[in-house]
């Protein structure tokens, strides 16, 4: 990578790195795993930077989703993920219910298969269309729609089973 390309890549990482880390965290549910996943994706991007600089963010996202699914398939096991303690009361008052809801949704997301989790992250956290999700994951829009439907149904079951969220609260707005 020449000096100019290196500066462009560094500027890209500086500008978009925090957003990409948020996506990686939503996929992995663990800060350290998210950092590792993002670092791998950025390393792969750096190798091809001069050919993809205009579509760099989409390229990094594709690498994140594909590497995450591949890594999960290799491990074939669920890991316990420690969660941080809820923040103490602040100016907004008691946030314990909101934190409990977020933990419930987060825990339920982690119990979904990686492909379903990736579909939900892309559709609802990244706010991509079914067509865009299909392009990222390399499948048809119909597959995205069916995976999203199944994932949301399973997510509702898991959340209801935890008994933390009221039925009308069980939407993905909690994770945004």
Image (cartoon, grey):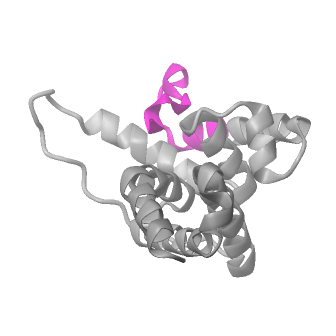
Pick whichever, 116 or 105, lies toward us: 116
Pick whichever, 12 or 6, lies toward us: 6
Residue appearing at x 82%, y 34% in the figure: 145
Residue appearing at x 24%, y 49% in the figure: 86
Q: Extreme left residue here?
A: 91
Pick whichever, 169 or 38, lies toward us: 38
Q: Tell me the quadrant of the picture where the C terminus can be found.
A: top left
**Which residues fall within the magenta stretch?**
155-176
Relative image position of residue 124 (x, y in whole percent)? 59, 34
Relative image position of residue 8 (x, y in whole percent)? 45, 60
Left of 20 or right of it: where is 11? left
Q: Which secondary structure class fits the magenta region best?
A: helix
Left of 41 or right of it: where is 3? left
Left of 66 or right of it: where is 134? right
Q: How many marks?
A: 0
For the question of whether residue 30 can be seen, the reply is no
Q: Tell me the quadrant of the picture where the N terminus can be found.
A: bottom right
Residue appearing at x 25%, y 38% in the figure: 96
Relative image position of residue 67 (x, y in whole percent)? 67, 69
Residue 147 quadrant: top right
Residue appearing at x 49%, y 24% in the figure: 169
Q: Is residue 171 magenta?
A: yes
Is residue 95 shown above or below 104?
above
Residue 95 quadrant: top left
For the question of whether residue 18 can be seen, the reply is yes
Is residue 33 shown above or below 158?
below
Relative image position of residue 52 (x, y in whole percent)? 66, 59
Pick whichever, 163 or 55, lies toward us: 55
Q: Is residue 144 magenta?
A: no
């Amino acid at each position: 990578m020449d000096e100019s390309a290196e500066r462009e890549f560094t500027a890209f990482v500086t500008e978009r790195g925090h957003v990409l880390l948020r996506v990686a965290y939503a996929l992995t549910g663990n800060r350290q795993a998210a950092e590792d996943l993002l670092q791998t994706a950025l390393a792969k991007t750096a190798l091809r930077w001069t050919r993809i600089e205009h579509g760099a963010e989409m390229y990094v996202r594709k690498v994140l989703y594909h590497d995450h699914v591949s890594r999960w398939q290799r491990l074939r096991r669920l890991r316990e993920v420690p969660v941080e303690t809820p923040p103490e009361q602040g100016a907004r008052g008691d946030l314990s219910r909101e934190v409990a809801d977020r933990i419930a949704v987060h825990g339920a997301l982690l119990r979904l298969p990686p492909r379903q989790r990736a579909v939900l992250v892309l559709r609802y956290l990244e706010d991509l269309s079914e067509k865009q999700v299909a392009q990222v994951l390399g499948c048809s829009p119909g597959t995205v729609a069916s995976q999203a439907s199944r994932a949301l149904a399973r997510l509702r079951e898991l959340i209801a089973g935890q008994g933390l969220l009221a039925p009308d609260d069980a939407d993905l707005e909690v994770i945004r």
